[in-house]
Image (spheres, rainbow, N blue to C red):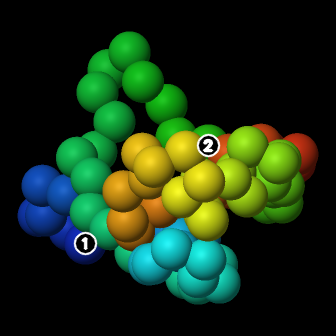
Amino acid sequence: MASKPGNTTMQIKALAVKKTGGLLEEYKFDVEPPKLHECLIKVLTCGICYSDLHMIDNDWGQSKYPLQATKLGMRIK
């Protein structure tokens, strides 16, 4: 997670699928820096569950892409 000096946003690097049934790929997006009551965490490893696989494949007809499916933090720094 890097933020350039004088920038009002910071870039986040994650994994996402870009289409139904797609493979997880690196995905970067910008967010506002954390507010006073928020904090940053660095996720070192993560996993996915079966509901993530259903969302990747749009089995329930509600997925929106790009879709970040990795949400289970295993090691956090």
Coordinates of residue 74 in the picture (x, y in percent): 88, 45
The answer to whether residue 61 is above or below residue 13 is: above
Q: Of helix, strand and loop, which one carries label 2?
A: loop
The answer to whether residue 77 is above or below residue 27 is: above
Q: Nearer the viewer, mark 1 or mark 2?
A: 2
Residue 2 visible in the snapshot:
no
C-beta proximity under 8 Å, tags 1 and 2: no
Task: Give me the disc on residue 4.
Answer: 1
Q: How far apart are labels 1 and 2 at the CA level?
A: 18 Å
Q: Which residue sits at x=59%, y=82%?
A: 22
Mark 2, Cα crowd under 10 Å, few <14 / some 14-19 / many 20+, is: few
Q: Which residue sits at x=38%, y=15%?
A: 37
Of the numbered discs 1 and 2, the one sitting upstream in the chain is 1
For this orientation, the residue located farthest to the top is 37
Left or right of 57 in this view: 3 = left
Left or right of 3 in this view: 39 = right
Coordinates of residue 49 in the picture (x, y in percent): 83, 47
Tell me the kind of residue under disc 2.
Answer: Ile
Nearer to me, 71 or 21: 21
Nearer to me, 73 or 19: 19
Task: Give me the disc on residue 41.
Answer: 2
Mark 1, Cα crowd under 10 Å, few <14 / some 14-19 / many 20+, is: few
Tell me the kind of residue under disc 1.
Answer: Lys
Q: Of helix, strand and loop, which one carries label 1?
A: loop
Task: Give me the disc on residue 73.
Answer: none
Left or right of 76 in this view: 70 = left
Residue 74 visible in the snapshot:
yes
Displayed quadrant of residue 16: bottom right
Left or right of 57 in this view: 49 = right
Q: Which residue sits at x=28%, y=45%?
A: 33
Coordinates of residue 40 in the picture (x, y in percent): 52, 40
